[in-house]
Image (cartoon, rainbow, N blue to C red):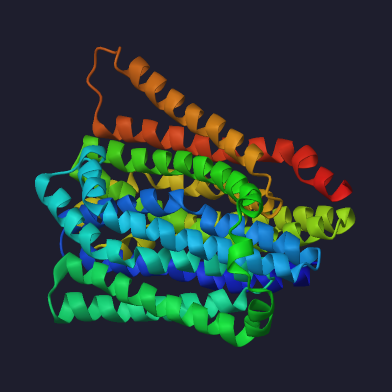
């Protein structure tokens, strides 16, 4: 089983680590321009996180349904899942393009920053939004490949996308001097290149299956779509909560100061790096859990969950040590602004406990996605997100009762305390629900 887990996880880790590495390259490029550019790209990427995270069900729901169809040897159903997901992805992308102006105005209300930071962030937004069809289409393609127990094709697609993106960003920003718009344009070009590659692989490796079972009309019938929409609706609501918490962190940081906004943006890169490593194992969990539930194999299901958690603990230990030893050095990769680096050092202790607080949340997300246990995921996220806001605002009310004015370090530490509680609670709640929500499905 360990060999099977690693066979799925390692390509996914390579796939996922290219995403934070890409973000780090973008951050490094603009980080050497000014602190204003750091804040702008933070807000710009947060806008897209808020948008795309809400449609993460296009990947997660697709992988869970496909894996269960694969385990039950229902390749015809696996093809129908692909058609549903890809059609829905394109429909949502068209809606986003039509609504880009209202979205930009809403973003100005949600996010805080100086006028120059907001101006640059919106320049980034209006260029990158045109990548929406490719980005969402790739969600469906990636989810389908994972459900089909194939992690290597998404790996090659991700590597190709990021090489194109990095090359374009360096060319447009450092050579052509197109500033933050160049970074966004590089993303647009890379996403469409990746979509073309993903469709090429689908035809090359799964062409016989796709053409044999391709029935667009039957795949999109309401009776066929109802279960797909139910699960994806739950994942959508769960992801809205996730996006709200992360968006609030960025917004609250901006209210404190532009400097704290830049600092927290850099610190969140540590979470991004760890989360995408852990998501490699979570994606393996999606594929294996879905497969064994589809095959009604309870013994293998329990073994895969247990080993996934052991791998998660091992990664937690490794990253905690890595951050303890090299936290300051990692910061210097992102920016050469001494003020930002010095300010960030006051909060590095949060990075040391971040892996322990978050690893279970990432792994159980994958386990529950594979089982399509979406209602439990949704309800657990409701509780964790509510707790985050409750802790933050209650803590803020208590601290404001003191007679001594509090500095920005105090407010930012309160924000990070609430965030760590939120991450921990997500994993704890899902762990408690695993026997009834996951194992029971393999007994039916």
Using residue 57 as the reference point, say whether residue 376 is left or right of it: right
Q: Position of residue 19 (x, y in %)?
A: 44, 67
- On the rendered structure, is 236 left or right of 217? left
Figure check: 350 above or below 326: above
Q: Residue at the far bottom: name it.
A: 204
Q: Does the rendering let one see residue 277?
A: no
Q: Position of residue 324 (x, y in %)?
A: 48, 54
Residue 399 location (% of width, % of height):
33, 18
The residue sitting at 67% across, 84% down in the picture is 208
- At x 38%, y 30%, the residue is 414
Is residue 261 toward the left or the right of residue 439 in the image? Answer: left
Which residue is drawn at the image coordinates 31% and 43% (left, top)?
A: 250
Location of residue 432 with respect to 322 vertically, above or below: above
Residue 211 x, y percent position in the rendering: 64, 80
Q: Which quadrant would residue 33 be assigned to in this image?
A: bottom left
**Residue positioned 58% across, 38% down in the render:** 378
Query: Of residues 5 and 416, which is closer to you in this image?
Result: 5
- The residue closer to the viewer here, 23 or 126, is 126
Q: Look at the image and tell me in which quarter the N terminus lies.
A: bottom right
């Amino acid at each position: 089983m360990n060999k099977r887990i690693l066979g799925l996880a390692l390509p996914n880790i390579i796939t996922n680590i290219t995403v934070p590495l890409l973000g780090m390259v973008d951050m490094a490029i603009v980080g050497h321009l000014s602190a204003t550019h750091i804040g702008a790209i933070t807000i710009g990427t947060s806008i897209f996180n808020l948008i795309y995270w809400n449609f993460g069900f296009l990947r997660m729901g697709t992988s869970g349904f496909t894996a269960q169809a694969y385990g039950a040897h229902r390749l015809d159903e696996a093809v129908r899942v692909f058609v549903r997901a890809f059609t829905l992805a394109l429909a949502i992308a068209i809606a986003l393009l039509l609504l880009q102006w209202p979205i930009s105005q809403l973003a100005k209300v949600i996010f805080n920053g100086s006028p120059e930071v907001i101006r640059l962030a919106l320049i980034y937004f209006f260029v990158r939004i045109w990548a929406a069809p490719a980005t969402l289409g790739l969600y469906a393609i990636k989810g389908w490949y994972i459900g089909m127990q194939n992690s290597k094709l998404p790996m090659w697609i991700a590597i190709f996308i990021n090489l194109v993106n990095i090359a374009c960003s360096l060319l447009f920003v450092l050579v052509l001097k197109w500033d933050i718009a160049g970074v966004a344009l590089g993303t647009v070009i890379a996403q469409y290149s990746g979509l073309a590659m993903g469709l090429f692989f689908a035809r090359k490796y799964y062409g016989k299956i796709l053409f044999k079972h391709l029935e667009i009309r039957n795949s999109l019938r309401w009776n066929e779509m109802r279960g797909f929409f139910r699960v994806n609706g739950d994942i959508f609501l769960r992801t809205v909560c996730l996006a709200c918490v992360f968006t609030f962190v960025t917004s609250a940081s901006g209210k404190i100061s532009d400097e704290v906004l830049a600092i927290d943006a850099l610190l969140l890169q540590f979470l991004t790096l760890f989360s995408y490593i852990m998501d490699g194992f979570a994606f393996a969990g999606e594929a294996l859990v879905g497969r064994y539930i589809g095959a009604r194999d309870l013994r293998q299901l329990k073994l895969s969950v247990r080993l996934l958690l052991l791998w998660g603990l091992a990664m937690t230990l490794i990253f905690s040590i890595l951050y303890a030893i090299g936290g300051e050095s990692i910061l210097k990769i992102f920016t050469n602004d001494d003020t930002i680096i010095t300010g960030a050092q006051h909060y590095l202790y949060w990075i040391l406990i971040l892996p322990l607080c978050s690893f279970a949340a990432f792994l159980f997300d994958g386990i529950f996605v594979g089982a399509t246990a979406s209602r439990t995921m949704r309800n657990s996220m409701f509780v964790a997100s509510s707790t985050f806001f409750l802790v933050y605002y209650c803590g803020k009310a208590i601290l404001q009762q003191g007679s001594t004015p509090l500095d920005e370090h105090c407010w930012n530490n309160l924000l990070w305390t609430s965030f760590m509680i939120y991450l921990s609670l997500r994993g704890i709640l899902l762990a408690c629900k695993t026997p009834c929500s996951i194992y029971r499905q393999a007994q039916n």
